[in-house]
Image (cartoon, helix red, strand yellow):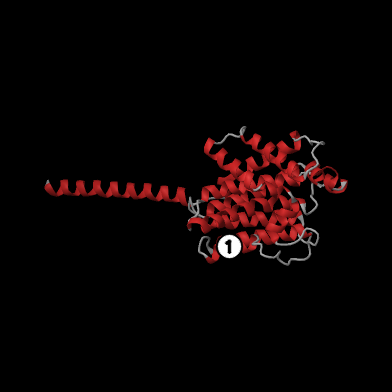
Amino acid sequence: MKNIKFKLGFSLIAILFIVACSKEDSTKIETTQLKVSDFNKIGKIHNSFLTNVKDNFKIIETFTDEQEKIEAIYQFNKDFVTSLDISSTEKNLLIADLNKTKSLVKEDVLISKSFGISINNKSNSKKQENEENLFDIIENLKTDGKINNESYQILNSLSNDLKANYEGSLSDNQLKINVQLLINDFNNVGYSENTEGELVGTVLAISISSIEWWEQNPDALDNLASKSNASNKALIAPWLAADLVGGTLGAVASAGIQKGVNGDVNWEIVGWSALAAGATASTGAVGKIVKWLF
């Protein structure tokens, strides 16, 4: 009888142990396997900024000063944040980063900070003096151990593709294909939550969402695109790249700044920085804004 009780007791313990381990493994899988689709909310919010600008932004003809115009665009985007279905903390983070990145609405500022090239000489890839660009920041994050080799490869490949698209040597269709391949790469890595995966996943979610938005809204370019391109739902470089690179720059710049200040990176904050910079840059790509600013 004692032997039976012992066996029953041992079996019960074994079962409880197996169940506990099973739950732990289940939780582990749930929390470590990040997918780009987990960041679809950010991509949708990014696109909502674009739609809001396209449909609702009114050109203020009396504004002639460039800074005055930039401030008006920032205020417009800031006001839109209040309508978003996100927490008050997230709204505050987003508004703060919209303010920090408001100069990126200007194409020349965005491209200089991203690629280190002059807007007046797109084929010249020479870095602007004393200015750390997108590629430099990615390199530094890898050197300092803040991102692993997989993240480095994805971010570097995306940045090179955006630069090629901006310069006109990579088509919009091929850019979309390449982004989808990078999404597959990300999904196969197995990133954990609260890691660099938050940065890379957000950037890719914004990128593919933006591409899809421009495919569906070619008229947002107004007369900046040819009728033939608009009818084919294709986009003329550099407008697509100027949109996508904003999110990438915002994310890695935020990570780089945090690393420099305290040595650690809050990856959630990085995600909202990506959204803010992406929203600002995409606003600057909408045709009526481009014509107004320049």
Position above or below: 136 against 80: below
Look at 57% across and 38% down and name the residue there.
Answer: 91
Q: Tell me residue 219's x, y (percent).
A: 81, 41
Of residues 2 and 111, the one nearer the viewer is 111
**Front residue (pair 13, 192):** 192
Residue at position x 56%, y 39% in the image? 92
Q: Residue furthest right?
A: 227
Residue 87 visible? The answer is no
* Left or right for 157, reference 34: right
* Residue under label 1: 152
Q: Residue furthest left?
A: 2
Task: Place residue 134 in its image quadrant.
Answer: bottom right
Question: Tag 1: residue type?
Answer: Tyr
Q: Splitting the image into 4 quarters, where does residue 283 fall?
A: top right
Within 10 Å of the Cα at label 1, are there few (<14), some (14-19), or many (20+) other Cα atoms?
A: some
Question: Residue 52 versus residue 116: which sits nearer the camera?
Answer: 116
Q: Secondary structure at mark 1?
A: helix
Q: Residue 95's spot in the image, x, y percent?
A: 60, 40
